[in-house]
Image (tube, grey):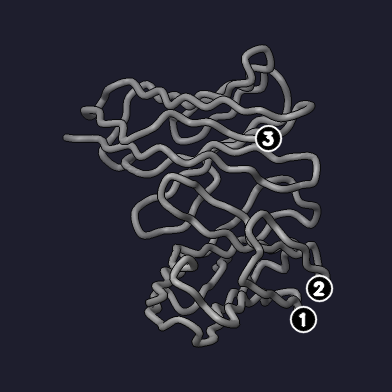
Amino acid sequence: EAQVTQNPRYLITVTGKKLTVTCSQNMNHEYMSWYRQDPGLGLRQIYYSMNVEVTDKGDVPEGYKVSRKEKRNFPLILESPSPNQTSLYFCASSVRDRFTGELFFGEGSRLTVL
Amino acid sequence: GNSVTQMEGPVTLSEEAFLTINCTYTATGYPSLFWYVQYPGEGLQLLLKATKADDKGSNKGFEATYRKETTSFHLEKGSVQVSDSAVYFCAYMDSSYKLIFGSGTRLLVRP
């Protein structure tokens, strides 16, 4: 089954404790992206990757890191989480080799930073 | 700057009612336009798209027409069902191949 898998789905952590949210897709997509969803703000892009070893900042990259060592994986790293990073996070990949705006989303990871 | 504006929700309708969710955008050129839907507890799914002026995207009884003159892409459905209850996001793709999303509109359909 074609899917984007995120882990963990739910996480409560404390300020400053490093964490990684993993994302894996099994569709051989080149394009992958991370978004955060906050009430009243819709989805905002954190980072994206057009291909292996190529990553770029989105609109709200501060406090986050990513890596793209393999085509299928695109982990999101919070080196020192803060309460303003409490949010619902979505990983997504493109259904076509060349990005056309059609994204396939994971089920989301709800993160709470105390 | 570039942006997408959607009507604020929640929109509450009775089953079989007509649905319109307004969406307007501010962008240069003629971007591709999209509607995504998010069902409770799930990620977003592409609902429909239109890539040029006057195109009509359609799927699952939903329709939206790309109106260049009014920079709009309103979502419509003739007869909603309880299963259509979800959050609907309008979006466009900018010139750097990034999706710009609206803030979402929650639809609640009552039996």
Q: Amino acid at mark 1?
A: Lys
Q: Position of residue A3 (x, y in %)?
A: 56, 66
Q: Amino acid at mark 3?
A: Asn
Quadrant in the rendering for residue A20: bottom right
Residue at 63% of width from left, 72% of height from top? A64
| Residue occupying image coordinates x 80% and y 52% | A98
Say few, some or many: other residues with alpha carbon within 10 Å of mark 2 (under 14 / 14 to 19 / 20 or more): some
Q: Residues within 10 Å of mark 3 (few under 14, many from 20)?
A: few
Residue identified by numbered label 3 = B2
Tell me the subunit letter for badge 2.
A
Q: CA distance from mark 2 to mark 1?
A: 6 Å
Q: Which comes before the other along the chain, label 2 or label 1?
A: 2
Q: Nearer the viewer, residue A83 or B55?
A: A83
Q: Position of residue A51 (x, y in %)?
A: 81, 67
Label 2 sits on a secondary structure element that is: loop
In contact (CB < 8 Å): disc 2 and disc 1: yes
Q: Mark number for residue A31?
A: none
Q: Height in image: B29 above or below A27?
A: above
The residue that label 2 is drawn on is: A52
Q: Nearer the viewer, residue B48 or A37?
A: A37
Task: Pinpoint residue A69: horizontal percent, then vertical percent.
Answer: 77, 81
Distance CA(mark 3)–CA(mark 2): 29 Å
Q: Secondary structure at mark 3?
A: loop
Residue linked to disc 1: A69
Chain that bears disc 1 = A
* B25 or B37: nearer the viewer: B25
Quadrant of the drawing holding the C terminus of chain B = top left
Residue at 59% in and 74% down: A23
Q: Is label 1 on the same chain as label 3?
A: no
